[in-house]
Image (cartoon, rainbow, N blue to C red):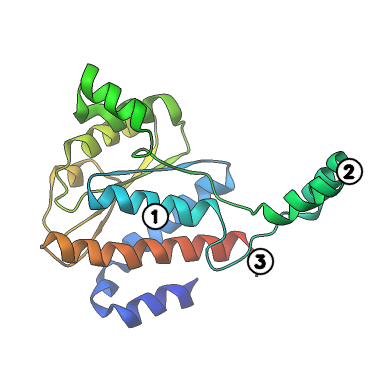
């Protein structure tokens, strides 16, 4: 894992100043996944796309194949024969992650019927439990709907991680862990966010899965 993090800093030397919060975020995600917890992600615009990207890397193999364990494979084969063998070879291991940006019917209904500033807070209130982790992505650090989700997380005893820029925003006042990249322009902040969350996904995969 140190090798993975060191490779990040070799490619992006300016990010070495935020090693501590990156390691803290990794440790919290790791502990949550070990306890069958779920990572929830939320953000807006490009950050919403980042949420989908993160979840995609966690729900399936990233750089490793993540084959099913032999016990589960045998259950499929014993129950379904050749069809069980096929599915047991196609399915992969994964880590439980949900993007709160991914439910268009709910999002549009809540936006229309209630208030768009609470679309993530509502989902987290229903779906999340103590021991889960919320990753909020906000380049400005001032996204109202991300802040409101973090309020729910506080009440439900869910650790919160904020991926943001170097200007303190409102979300910084409530987040438990702040990964603030050394940039102010939105597009540069987003360019730094991607290698950070890729590194976190690589570190998690390295911890939980064999080659």
**Which numbered dot is residue 183?**
none
Q: Would you name the residue on which mark 1 appears?
A: 53
Front: mark 3 or 2: 2
SS label for mark 2: helix
Decide which of tag 3 and tag 2 comes sooner along the chain.
2
Q: Residues within 10 Å of mark 3 (few under 14, many from 20)?
A: few
- Tell me residue 156's x, y (percent): 39, 29
Query: Is residue 11 placed above or below 192 in the rendered structure?
Result: below
Nearer-the-camera pick, 105 or 138 = 105
Q: Is residue 203 left or right of residue 14?
A: right
**Residue located 58% across and 51% down the image:** 94
Q: Is residue 193 left or right of residue 58?
A: left
Residue 105: quadrant of the picture: top left
- Tell me residue 182's x, y (percent): 17, 67
Residue 123: quadrant of the picture: top left
Q: Is residue 16 left or right of residue 140?
A: right
Decide which of tag 2 and tag 1 comes sooner along the chain.
1
Residue 133: quadrant of the picture: top left
- Tell me residue 19's x, y (percent): 33, 68
Nearer-the-camera pick, 202 or 47 = 47
Residue 15 in view of the camera: yes
**Residue located 27% across and 72% down the image:** 15
Q: Would you name the residue on which mark 2 appears?
A: 78
Residue 155 in view of the camera: no
Q: Residues within 10 Å of mark 1 (few under 14, many from 20)?
A: some
Decide which of tag 3 and tag 1 comes sooner along the chain.
1
**Residue located 34% across and 82% down the image:** 10
**Which numbered dot is residue 210?**
3
User: How far is disc 2 from disc 1 in space, using C-alphas?
Assistant: 35 Å
Nearer-the-camera pick, 58 or 8 = 58
């Amino acid at each position: 894992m140190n090798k993975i993090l060191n490779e990040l800093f070799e490619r992006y030397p300016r990010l070495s100043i935020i090693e501590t919060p990156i390691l803290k975020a990794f440790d919290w995600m790791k502990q949550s996944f070990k306890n069958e917890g779920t990572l929830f992600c939320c953000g807006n615009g490009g950050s919403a796309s980042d949420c989908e990207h993160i979840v995609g890397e966690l729900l399936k193999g990233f750089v490793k194949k993540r084959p099913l364990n032999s016990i589960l494979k045998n259950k499929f084969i014993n129950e379904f024969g050749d069809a069980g063998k096929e599915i047991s070879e196609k399915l992969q291991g994964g880590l439980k992650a949900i993007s709160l940006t991914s439910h268009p019917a709910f999002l549009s209904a809540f936006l229309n019927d209630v208030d768009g500033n609470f679309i993530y807070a509502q989902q987290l209130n229903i779906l999340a439990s103590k021991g889960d982790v919320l990753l909020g992505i906000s380049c400005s650090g001032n996204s109202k709907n991300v802040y409101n989700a973090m309020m729910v997380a506080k009440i439900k005893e869910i650790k919160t991680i904020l991926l943001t820029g170097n200007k303190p925003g409102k979300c910084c006042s409530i987040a438990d862990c702040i990964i603030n990249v050394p940039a102010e322009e939105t597009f540069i902040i987003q360019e730094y966010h991607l290698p950070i969350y890729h590194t976190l996904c690589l570190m998690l995969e390295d911890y939980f899965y064999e080659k």
